[in-house]
Structures are given as C-alpha cells and as structure tokens.
Image (cartoon, helix red, strand yellow):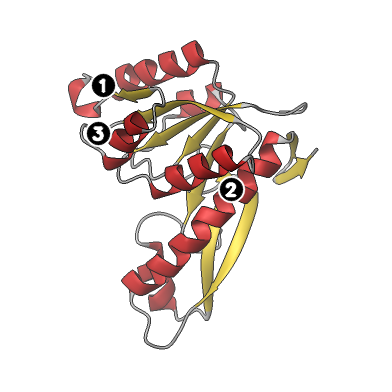
Amino acid sequence: MEGGIGLLAVLLSGRGSNFLAIHDAVERGEIPARIVAVISNRKGAAGIERARQLGLPAFVFDHDDYPSRQAHEEAVMGVLAETGAELVVLAGYMRRLSSTFVSRYRHRIVNIHPSLLPAFPGLDAQTQALAYGVRVSGCTVHLVDEEVDGGPVVVQRVVEVVEDDTAETLAARILEEEHQAYVEALRKLCGGYRVEGRKVVFG
C-alpha cells in the first residue's frame, strides 16, 4: 500500500489489550490513522465493550450464529467494505481467516504473534519456547498470508528468557513488548509500504 494508510479496522476476540494500546497511540497522534471499526467474533468480549465505551463503531458477528465460515466472513467483510477500512488489524482475533478473506485483503491484514517468527508458530508459543530452552523470545508483527503465522515480518521485539520463567510470566513480559511493537508497526505501515518477496519495504 504505497501512498499511506489512514483507516484501520481492528478484529478481536477477547480483552483487547493490544487494541487499547493502538487506540491510545492513535489518540496521542503516534499512529497517523483512524479506527473506523472494531469487530468481534464473540458476544461479550471485553474489548468490544471497551470500544463501545470509547465511542468507536463496534460490531459483533458471533461465529456460532452463522451456518458457515464463509457466511461469517462475508458479514465481517461487509463492514470492512462499508467503513472503507484500508488495513485489517488482528488484535487477539482467535479465528483463522480463510484463503478467500486473505486473498481479498492481500498484504493488508496485520497480526501479532508472541514469538520471534519463524520460531514457534501457532498456539502456546511461550510453552514451545520454554520447552526448547531458548535464551530469548519476543514478539513479531507480520502481514498475514495463507500459512499460519507465516507472512512477511514488519517488526520484531526481543524478550530475555530468565531461569525461573513459566509460560505465564514469559507471556506477561512479551505482552508488554507487543503493545509497543504493534504501535511501531502500524506507524510504519501507515506511512506507506510495499512487499517485495518476503520483505516489507516502507515509504
């Protein structure tokens, strides 16, 4: 997306801590963009309630209410089209997107993962990291493609693994870095970017 991006749609399933970090950064002027939609696939998600309190356009499409993944995604994509969202930001969205969805928003979907990809993709990344015995872990903001946690890297931040770490303590320290990494990544992406192979080129 060359020439800059200004309209963000945030998809979430839970408490939305990354969403709130992004919202606060937008309000401070650190991300040159506007959140035009916050969408959840779960009724009662704390993040969607917070979005409503903040006066943001909030939508719930509980996937259990739809007969198929296609029907659910068509509802979500309808809001994305109506709001003119230019970048789809996954902030704890616990539902895998279909190849149809990814193809329609090619290189315009962003996700964050709690490991230094390509290491430890998928679920329980912190448990995987500790089991492997790594000395550092961290988080990765990446563009989404059809492979789970496999798209081009935008930003990475490193977190040291300490001797008495558990999956929970490591996850908590990584989450602190996630909030900063997502803000940094969106600030860069909103300034314009293009994808060359597996490399994201800014500006």
The Cα–Cα distance between marks 3 and 2, rounded to whole angstroms, is 24 Å
Number of numbered discs overlaid on the protein picture: 3
Q: Residue at x 44, y 48 (%)?
A: 18
Q: Is residue 192 left or right of residue 157?
A: right
Question: What amino acid type should be assigned to the residue bearing mark 2?
Answer: Val
Judging by the rendered image, the residue that carries numbered circle 3 is 42
Question: What amino acid type should be assigned to the residue bearing mark 1?
Answer: Ser
Residue nearer the viewer, 13 or 30: 30
Q: Tell us which disc is closer to us: 3 or 2.
A: 2
Local SS, label 3: loop
Q: Tell us which disc is closer to us: 1 or 3.
A: 3
Rendered image quadrant of residue 33 = top right
Judging by the rendered image, the residue that carries numbered circle 2 is 183
The Cα–Cα distance between marks 1 and 3, rounded to whole angstroms, is 15 Å
Marks 1 and 3, the one that precedes in the sequence: 3
| x and y percentages locating residue 62 in the rendered image | 24, 27
Residue nearer the viewer, 166 or 129: 166
Q: Which mark is residue 68?
A: 1
The Cα–Cα distance between marks 2 and 1, rounded to whole angstroms, is 33 Å
Q: Residue at x 39, y 66 (%)?
A: 171
Report if the CB atoms under discs 3 and 2 are less than 8 Å apart.
no
Question: Which quadrant: the N terminus?
Answer: top right
Marks 2 and 1, the one that precedes in the sequence: 1
Residue 19 position (above or below residue 136):
above
Question: What amino acid type should be assigned to the residue bearing mark 3?
Answer: Arg
Local SS, label 2: helix
Q: Which mark is residue 11?
A: none
Report if the CB atoms under discs 1 and 3 are less than 8 Å apart.
no
Q: Residue at x 40, y 29 (%)?
A: 38
Q: Residue at x 21, y 19 (%)?
A: 67
Q: Tell us which disc is closer to us: 2 or 1.
A: 2
Q: Is residue 157 visible?
A: yes
